[in-house]
Amino acid sequence: MADSPSDPGRALIELRDVQIRHPDIVGTWRVNGVNWRVEPGDFWAVGGLHWSGKTNLLLTAAGVNLRARGALSLFGRELDALDPEEALRERLRIGLVFGGDGRLLPDLTVAENVALPLRYLRGVDDQEMETRVRRVLDELALLESAAELAGAVDLACRRRAALARAVILEPEVLLFDQPLGGLDPRQRAWWRDLIDELHAGHAALDSRPATIVVATEDLRPWRDRAGQFALLDEGRFHVVGDREAMKNCDHTLARELHLQEQTKD
Amino acid sequence: MESDTPTIGELRQPDATAFFVPSRFGFLTRQFLTLSQGLYGLGRFAFLTVSVGIAKIFRSRNVVWPEIRRQVLNGGVRQIPIATFMALALGFVVSGQLHVLKTVIGVKSQTYAGGAMVTVVIRELGCMAITLLALARNGAAMVIELGAALVKGETMALQAAGVDPVHYLVVPRVIGQSLSVFCLTFGFNALATASAYLFMYALGFTLPLGEYLDQLSTYLRPLDFLFLVIKPALFGAVVGCVCCQQGLMRPTKLEHIASATTTAVVVTLVVCVLLNGLFVGLFYLI
């Protein structure tokens, strides 16, 4: 198994010997000894079983503070050395797309959920905000549901709204937490294609290529898409390497998540 | 690590007082330690709320101020009918008691009308009744709403999107409750005072309006006017702060929300009664 990549190029996200604590159970940790570099243009797939700490890893990588120890730098800047305003600016260059129901606020409409970070952080005027929100909603096929309460729309729509909320601030890195979980085959195909397009350059991000990290319980849909692979197993983070390294990886979890034939769905 | 003021997540982590695990001690010590730790946690949360509220007072006004308006609408305007009913009922109760007194001491009982209204309703019951109303109608709902948001990861999602959950979720609720309880208490006291007079008139008292108003002004002290502003505003803030704290600090699973709601009600009552005692002490000392 390979160690953390040692390429001297600028890392967009770099975690060094990070211990990620449990957000709810005080005094416990979820993942230990995380050494990880995400570089421009990367497409990472991080595999782990249920409850292995994937979401907490993504939250930590996005700068939401779950570190018990270790160092995190975003875009080449040590987060701990920055003042809160600067740290927030760097954090917002990373978009986090949650799985499950997308973690939207259920008593706001889809459009209000998408607009919230923009209104809160940028204070743009109503007309500009409406234009930008409308454009993103249109790109993600959400216009029809824009006026509906987030708590009242279906799962696929909520998941897309979560993506829209993440891309509205035009981040450079997108972290996806189980983007295909619980979706039907048509939706899964839509998400796979969209993530490919976001990596190559999608209109929702002004055609700028995004660096992608996908955390998943099933690596099979990503084995021909992602360029770099990592595993979360028993509280440890293992960087596997590229497709070839993943293919030849003899880790039990790698075989479970990656090499099985696609019999499901 | 990122900010000088602790975040919700950091407040939920163990602190230096963790050594004093209440279960290690006897009953009384245990109760005292539990109460102390509870008040300490509430104090930290209140400090965080005030710090964030002040530091970001003019920031994101287009998002936070409409939230405050929404909280005032829910916690104040929508409670006007029930507050009106309670004020009329309290006016009726006081006038009814004066009528009972009239059967014992005769017409002289009407000379106590103003005093009874000031000492019982305006100084004490009005504010407490509205606080209880706010707690029952809004506080409990607040714990459930925020507890569910926490358990479902919505607060974490807000944080990830750059929205400060304390600024967006807690500050508007605390300010909204404070304004609502203040305004409702003012209206409640005025209406209860007026309705008591009307009910007395209906019950056959012959107290002229001018004399009733004279009695009220005789019993009201300048300090009453100051306390009439401070007390309801503070009690409303306590409702908002305790309920937000219990909603955002305690639940880790949906089934914890019920006990957090019960705790919020009990803690709010205890804190408000203690503060009320403090106000009474101050009133008679000054």
Image (cartoon, coloured by chain):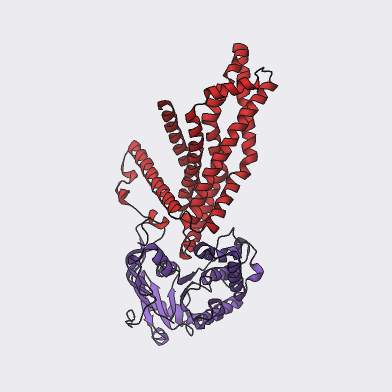
Chain colours: A purple, B red
Residue positioned 54% across, 26% down in the render: B118
- Judged left or right of residue A113, residue A230 is left
Furthest residue in direction bottom, as rendered: A244
Q: Is residue B38 left or right of residue B264?
A: left
Residue A182: x and y in percent read 56, 70
Say if residue A242 shows up in the picture: yes
On screen, residue A110 above or below B17 = below
The answer to whether residue A263 shows anywhere in this view is: no
Residue furthest to the top: B105
Q: Residue at x 39, y 66 (%)?
A: A87
Looking at the picture, does residue B32 appear above or below residue A72? above
Could you tell me residue B199's position as x and y percent? 67, 24
Apparent side of residue A112 relative to residue A23 in the rendered image (left or right): right
Observer-nearest residue: A178 or A12? A12
Residue name at image x 48 percent, y 43 percent: B237
Say which quadrant the N terminus of chain A sits in.
Answer: bottom left
Residue A247 on image: x %, y %: 42, 85
From the image, which quarter does the C terminus of chain A lie in? bottom right
User: Number of marks in the image?
Assistant: 0
Can you give x and y, in whole percent of width and height, for residue B240 in the image? 50, 46
Residue A156, by quadrant, is bottom right
- Residue nearest the observer in this picture, B30 or A49: B30
Q: Is residue B43 above or below residue A134?
A: above
